[in-house]
Image: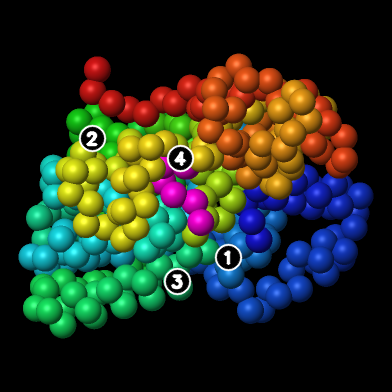
Amino acid sequence: MRGAGLWQLGQSITRRIAQGDKKAVARRYFASEAELKKTVLYDFHIANGGKMVPFAGWGMPIQYKDSIIDSTINCRQNGSLFDVSHMCGLSLKGKDSIPFLEKLVIADVASLAPGTGTLTVFTNEKGGAIDDSVITKVTDDHIYLVVNAGCRDKDLAHIEEHMKAFKAKGGDVSWHIHDERSLLALQGPLAAPTLQHLTKEDLSKLYFGEFRILDINGARCFLTRTGYTGEDGFEISVPDENAVDLAKAILEKSEGKVRLTGLGARDSLRLEAGLCLYGNDMEQHTTPVEAGLTWAIGKRRRAEGGFLGAEVILKQLEEGPKIRRAGFISSGPPARSHSEIQNEKGETIGEVTSGGFSPCLKKNIAMGYVKSGSHKAGTKVKIIVRGKAYDGAVTKMPFVPTKYYKPS
């Protein structure tokens, strides 16, 4: 199931449950429940009113007792706790782990200071995106990264294939997939003060993009100050046996202000923050340059290349791409994935990849790809929804200002 439909799906389930049609909801959305993988927190979600749906082969909460709109607003005003254990964390180790990874991603991994990370993209031979990932240089011979749940199998196969070839030439690199760990995302203005109650480490000295291995609520955790909402927050990799206790402790220490939050609000939060969802806003045929992620291509990598598809990507950097990702505000019903975008003359210039109603801005927002030249802020467009054209305009992203915790 694609993420652009998560908000819509949540609304549909809420309506049907409100109408008392729980059997239809079960038939339509939970038919394959027995086949779905479950996170360690699955029963905890059910006990707390989580409405579970299939997502990337997992049973995951789309929302809880409050609406997706209320959950989105609460994250920005107070805080949210997400179970993102369906995502795949892994470590690369060995003295050649950095040169190995740099063959597969666009980041300048070597120049990262130990304990810092960055967003990057795994590319294919044509410069297209295999997946996006947050990678962290723990030490010079240990890289920790997290890849998307829906891309897990192809990502791991891709890494393994290249690792075998690299090791056959004498390279020193090995990997460990952290299937013994769960992943929680704590986001919002109360994230840091709440988490501070559970660790002795001074979190005011941990900035956006930084990583520590430390004790939280008595468990050895990997802590990254990052997230997918545009708010300050953390992703916490915790041993499976400690995950439920940690989730309970976070909710308790926030005195009910941090709420369990599902995939529906996560989708509206990331869209408001102008963040890509792989499978919608980035795919195998989309390059990082077209996706507006030129900033993630390290300066040294631009000069030297050395990653898959470098020739295509460096040429786009020099000449400019033919299409670009852009943000939109529109009238009428919210635009959805694949809605056509036209210029004022009625000519097709692109299509929407993600769209929905912004709970915080109280207006329709979307992102998509248009021909270069039509991507500039203020450009007037028409967006076609259910066969009708509605007025829209290109808008700078993020739609909602980000609040990442950085040194002043």
x, y (%) of residue 126?
A: 41, 60
Q: Tag 3, which secondary structure?
A: helix
CA distance for labels 2 and 3? 33 Å
Q: Using a 10 Å C-alpha cutoff, classify the residue at mark 2 as few (fewer than 14 neighbours), some (14 to 19) or many (20 or more).
A: many
| Picture coordinates of residue 256, whole percent (x, y) | 54, 36
State which tag comes first along the sequence, 1 or 4: 1
Q: Specify start and end residues of the magenta stretch as a single range.
A: 285-291
Where disc 2 sits, the SS reads loop
Instruction: Looking at the picture, tell me which residue is in the foreground, 103 or 195.
Output: 103
Q: Secondary structure at mark 4?
A: loop
Q: Which badge, 4 or 3, is on the more N-terminal residue?
A: 3
Is 286 contained in the magenta span?
yes
Q: Main secondary structure of the magenta part?
A: loop
Q: Compared with residue 122, is residue 350 higher up or lower down, i.e. above or below?
A: above
Among the two numbered marks 2 and 3 on one chain, the one whose residue lies closer to the N terminus: 3
Question: How many neighbours does mark 3 have within 10 angstroms: few (below 14), some (14-19), or many (20 or more)?
Answer: few
Write down the residue under mark 1: 56
- Tell me the mark number nearer the camera, choosing from 1 and 2: 1
x and y, in percent, of residue 264 in the image: 64, 46
Q: Are marks 1 and 4 in contact (CB under 8 Å)?
A: no
Residue 167 drawn at (x, y percent): 16, 78
Query: Relative to 321, is 175 on the left or the right?
Result: left
Mark nearer the N terminus (1 vs 2): 1
**Residue at the image position 58 percent from the left and 36 percent from the top:** 371
Q: Nearer the viewer, residue 29 or 21?
A: 29
